[in-house]
């Protein structure tokens, strides 16, 4: 297995780290750090405003990255790409704008029980404020969306909010098939996809899966924190009023009235996270330099290796699909009679970085009948040695608790 660790300075500075928490946030390669420094050292200016050379360079760079992201997710138009500050802002933007105008008290707003709170709470709130009916589709015992239940009720729904990859189960939802079936039953439904855990690992094609909106964050895919992407179909966004009001999102402002800029700028109020945008462009270049095929293969090997080692340890329950091909990047588990936080604490004391708790998926944990779980998650820089260190750590946990 090829090691990519040398590209990530944190591992040179901290060779002791077994960083297995990339679903929370990823580490950054030197190429991304260099791009951020280059921006601040050589052309730091605001975008879309100045007409002097470094400001023009900044504006060009922002639009160049927008184009790169359009290709990255295969959107039809670059105006469909909106810079946000993260996935959560993307969901809240569509909930507050398009969603607020589209949902009435006669409609259903549907999500799934495997959603992160970010793709659950905003829709629950929208339904409440519009007096619409809100419900969450269950999962099967194997950790997949219960498609039968989804299709049974979907004809009354105006919005389906669904994740591409579960941040707890690791399930990769077969969105192309699911969305096609849903739209066949209900052609007016609009589908919002949370791609936060998918974008770092899977080649996304918004036209192929035919979603209406999709959001992801830069920081989980090797870029810096504070930058996110919202995709929306042009025909839907162009008639939607903005949600955040401010500087460069206008066409004309007068005391009598304000008109809004064209797409995508009407949804980009205030100064953009330019360093974040630059970092996202560099992160995409880095991902391309390896290739999605290799990223997936590397990750599948790690998941298979880790699951095989974990299965040899007694009293561990692993959640999510058994088929490796249906899993992406995360493995969540519980150990009988040891609290997830105790597991994470002991692992943490040994420089093994994992996440414990409800992972912002309380409804899912309730469905699974547990209060908390421990989660390991992988990125391209992880290797078998990280897994071995983690497995040794688990054995230590069990020894300490005499289990
Ligand atoms: N959403 C991130 C996670 O799953 C923070 O850990």
Image (cartoon, rainbow, N blue to C red):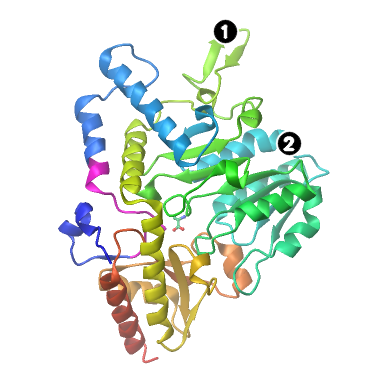
**Secondary structure mostly seen in the magenta stretch:** loop
Which circle marks residue 120 in the picture? none
Instruction: Calculate the distance from the C-alpha at mark 2 to the C-alpha at mark 1.
Output: 29 Å
Q: How crowded is mark 2: few (under 14 residues within 10 Å), some or many (20 or more)?
A: some
Which circle marks residue 254 in the picture? 1
Q: Name the residue under label 2.
A: 102
Image point (47%, 35%), residue name? 70
Is ligand 1 less than 8 Å from the beta carbon at label 2? no
Image point (60%, 75%), residue name? 369
Ligand 1 sits in which quadrant? Answer: bottom left
Please state which of residues 347 and 19 is positioned toward the viewer in this rendering: 19
Residue 85 appears in the rendering: no
Which comes sooner in the sequence, label 2 or label 1? 2
Residue 99 lies left or right of residue 8; in this view the side is right
Query: For the residues carrying marks 2 and 1, which lies nearer the camera in this image?
Result: 2
Asked whether 8 falls inside the magenta stretch, the response is: no
| Highlighted range, magenta | 20-33
Q: Give residue 16's quadrant in the image.
A: bottom left
């Amino acid at each position: 297995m090829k090691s990519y660790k040398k590209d990530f300075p944190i591992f040179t500075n901290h060779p002791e780290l077994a960083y297995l928490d990339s679903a929370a946030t990823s580490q950054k390669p030197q190429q991304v750090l260099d791009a951020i420094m280059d921006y601040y050292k050589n052309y730091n200016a605001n975008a879309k405003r100045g007409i002097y050379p470094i400001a023009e360079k900044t504006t060009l760079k922002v639009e160049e990255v927008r184009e790169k992201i359009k290709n990255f997710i295969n959107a039809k138009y670059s105006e469909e790409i909106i810079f946000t500050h993260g996935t959560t802002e993307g969901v809240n933007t569509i909930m507050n704008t398009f969603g607020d105008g589209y949902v009435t008290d006669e409609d259903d707003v549907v999500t799934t029980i495997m959603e992160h709170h970010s793709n659950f709470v905003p829709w629950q709130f929208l339904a409440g404020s519009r007096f619409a009916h809100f419900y969450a589709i269950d999962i099967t015992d194997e950790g997949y969306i219960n498609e039968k239940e989804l299709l049974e009720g979907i004809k009354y729904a105006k919005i389906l909010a669904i994740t591409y990859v579960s941040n707890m189960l690791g399930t990769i939802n077969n969105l192309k098939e699911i969305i096609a079936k849903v739209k066949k039953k209900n052609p007016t439904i609009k589908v919002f996809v949370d791609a936060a855990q998918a974008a770092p690992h899977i080649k996304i094609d918004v036209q192929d899966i035919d979603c209406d909106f999709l959001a992801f964050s830069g920081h989980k895919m090797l870029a810096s924190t504070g930058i996110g992407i919202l995709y929306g179909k042009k025909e839907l966004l162009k008639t939607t009023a903005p949600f955040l009001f401010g500087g460069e999102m206008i066409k004309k402002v007068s005391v009598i009235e304000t008109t809004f800029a064209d797409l995508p700028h009407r949804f980009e109020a205030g100064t953009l996270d330019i360093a974040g945008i630059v970092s996202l462009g560099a992160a995409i270049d880095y991902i391309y330099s390896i290739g999605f095929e290799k990223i997936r293969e590397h990750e599948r090997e790690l998941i298979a290796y880790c699951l095989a080692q974990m299965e040899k340890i007694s009293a561990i329950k692993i959640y999510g699909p058994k088929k490796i091909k249906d899993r992406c990047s995360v493995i969540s588990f519980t150990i009988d009679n040891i609290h997830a936080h105790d597991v994470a604490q002991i692992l943490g004391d040994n420089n093994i970085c994992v996440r414990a708790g409800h992972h912002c998926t309380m409804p899912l944990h309730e469905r699974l009948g547990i209060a908390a779980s421990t989660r390991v998650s992988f990125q391209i820089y992880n290797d078998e040695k990280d897994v071995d260190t983690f497995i040794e750590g688990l054995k230590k946990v069990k020894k300490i608790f005499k289990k």
